[in-house]
Amino acid sequence: MHFKARAGQKLADVILQDNLKKAKSKFVDRRATAILDLDDFEATRDSATALRDRVLNDLDLWLEKFEQQAAKSGASVLWARDGAEICWLVIDIAHRHGVKKAIKSKSMLSEEAGLNQALETAGIQPVETDLGEYILQISDNEPPSHIIAPVFHKSKEEVSALFARTHHLPAKDDIQALTREAREVLRPHFLSAEMGISGGNFLIAETGSVALVTNEGNGRMVTTLPKVHVVITGIEKVIPTLEDLATLMRLLPRSATGQSISNYFSLLTGAKQAAESDGPEHLYFILVDNGRADLVGGEFAEMLRCIRCGACMNHCPVYQAVGGHAYGWVYPGPMGAVLTPLFTGMQNALDLPQAATLCNQCGVVCPVKIPLPQLLLKLRAKQVEAHLRPFGERLGLRAWAWLALHPALYALATRIGVRYLLWLARDGKRNDRIRVLGVAPEWTLGRDFPAPEGKTFRELYAARKETA
């Protein structure tokens, strides 16, 4: 995933850094305000966590119930093992219904599968209709940098120049004018597309329904105007009842965008009936594994609780510094640092479990209490066990572990280490900071190290014992 190289580039990107600062206040501050509206916020988190665990413990049963109820309402439920099978199923559905154009509302599963490229290869025109995803599509299919606000890494000026170049219209500097221009360009696609493709925030087993949470009206047009609607979502998204949906919906918008409720909330059940005025004639659910089933019942099963709110990345100091593209795949931030190695293989994402400070801001704000730092530590341990970390790093960890088991030698080593740091501080130009340690160059190249001050903990503890 080349995280180190990408992170260096993003840190030097002046426009990105400015946009990241704006996004921090937008997401973090609004969430903090929104959760104050709930008198029982922590109790709701506990209920949501227990709910997600209960579903995952019997995931196969809830999926079977969803399939049965969806079929009763006229929908077809299909299953995909991986991204390639997602693409095959969608293209097969499109060919059976004579589809030439598919309009899309945001789906992270379609990003996992590379669906747009597959559709284009099959002669089907995909059109993204979420404003952010549309901007990315006309930016040479640039990947999203955030799961909620996929294009927040771009400035208004960049979007204006892109629209002028793509739409062959005069550049505009007003946000409302830019969004109106996008609506006018996309409206003909809504009316002419034969297929709509969406994700799904939750699948409700008792009714066979899909719940969609959006802030743009395009989601409803994608799911109701075309004659065919295809929902692509992960198998872990199923929940038992509408009451459970109400619990999760108290948390999702507050954690994601700081809203008590999203602008649009859609609950879709079955294909269009004879007495109904809108809706698709054909509804398909594609339920995707793509590595999820391997996590069920295992040491990383807690990651399947995730409701894709993005709160972990909004509060992560690493993500706030480098943005989403540095992570190299669909899911950025702490959730991506866990999911990407699990879904794509640890050997393909060596840097990501290390791309965290383990400060636990992500764990504190997660609405379903996923212990992200602990999961990252487990991945780090597995990398060491599989000899996927550099030899010097593994040797250093073994030496530290051996010293930690021998207190007298550990105390001697720490005394020597402190004296070395003090010598570096005296030898340097500044007495309060150490610029070069001579060890761990990747840590010390871009940061200063505070020089030790006062007595060590061991010295303070020994003195306290003497006076006790």
Image (cartoon, helix red, strand yellow):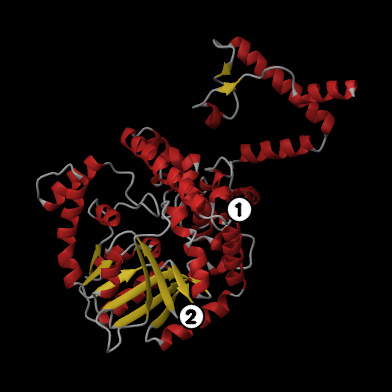
The answer to whether 179 appears left or right of 79 in the picture is left
Residue denoted by label 1: 371
Residue denoted by label 2: 66
Where is residue 231, by image quadrant?
Answer: bottom left
Residue at the image position 51 percent from the left and 72 percent from the top? 243
Residue type, numbered disc 1: Pro
Residue type, numbered disc 2: Phe
Q: Where in the figure is residue 298, as x and y percent of width and height?
A: 63, 64
Q: CA distance from mark 2 to mark 1?
A: 28 Å
Q: Secondary structure at mark 1?
A: loop
Where is residue 59, by image quadrant?
Answer: bottom right
Q: Earlier along the polypeptide chain: callout 2 or callout 1?
A: 2
From what the image shows, is residue 379 above or below residue 16?
below
The answer to whether 402 appears left or right of 319 in the picture is right
Where is residue 391, by image quadrant?
Answer: top right
From what the image shows, is residue 38 above or below residue 239?
above
**Label 2 crowd bin: few (<14), some (14–19), many (20+), radius 10 Å:** many
Front-lying residue, 463 or 347: 463
From what the image shows, is residue 261 above or below residue 223?
above
Residue at the image position 38 percent from the left and 59 percent from the top? 262
Quarter of the C terminus within the rendering: top right
Residue at the image position 39 percent from the left and 37 percent from the top? 21
